[in-house]
Structure formats: structure tokens, C-alpha cells
Amino acid sequence: FISVPSLDVLRHRLEKRGEDSPETIERRLANASGEMARAGEFSRTIVNGELEKAYSELLSTILGKAGE
């Protein structure tokens, strides 16, 4: 599961992009909240706070799974 550090961070990212209407941002935040609530259903969670670190964790997870 790939997650943002928090819904506040997600809101900031979406607003900074300037691509979505306020209504769309609210809908996306509601969807993200529901998705984040289910993160425990996954065997691995990667928090996308720092891109390089998240990418490294993702790559490590994929490569680790490939050997199974």
C-alpha cells in the first residue's frame, strides 16, 4: 500500500498542483481517507513522504517479492 504521510499533506499537494476544483479535491480526500483506513489489509505500507526514499522502498519490495 502506498500512502501519503497525512490527509493534510495530500490536500496541500493537490492544491499546489492547481489542477482540480475544490469539490474534486474534497472527493479525492474522502476517497483517500477510506483507502488509508484499509492500509492494514496489505502486507507492506510505503509512505510517500520523500520521493527518493519511497521509490527505494518500493523497488526493494518489488525485487524482494520477485525472488519468492
Image (cartoon, rainbow, N blue to C red):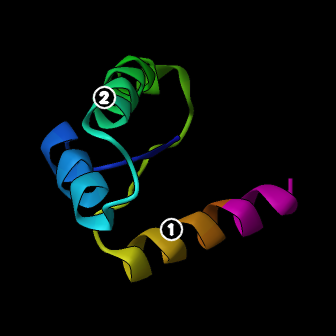
Residue 16 vertical position relative to residue 7 in the rendered view, above or below: below
Specify the farthest residue to the front: 21
Distance from disc 2 to disc 1, alpha carbons, whole Å, reads 33 Å
Q: Position of residue 49 (x, y in %)?
A: 28, 64
- Which residue is identified by label 1? 57
Reply yes or no: does residue 27 show up in magenta: no
Amino acid at pointer 1: Glu
**Magenta span dominant secondary structure:** helix
Quadrant for residue 42, please give it.
top right
User: Could you say which is closer to the camera, residue 60 or residue 32?
Assistant: 32
Q: Secondary structure at mark 1?
A: helix
Q: Which mark is residue 23?
A: 2
**The magenta stretch spans which residues?**
62-68
Q: Amino acid at mark 2?
A: Glu
Does residue 29 sit above or below 18 in this rendering? above
The residue positioned 44% from the left and 68% from the top of the image is: 54
Q: Nearer the viewer, mark 2 or mark 1?
A: 2
What percent of the width, then of the height, locates residue 68? 86, 53
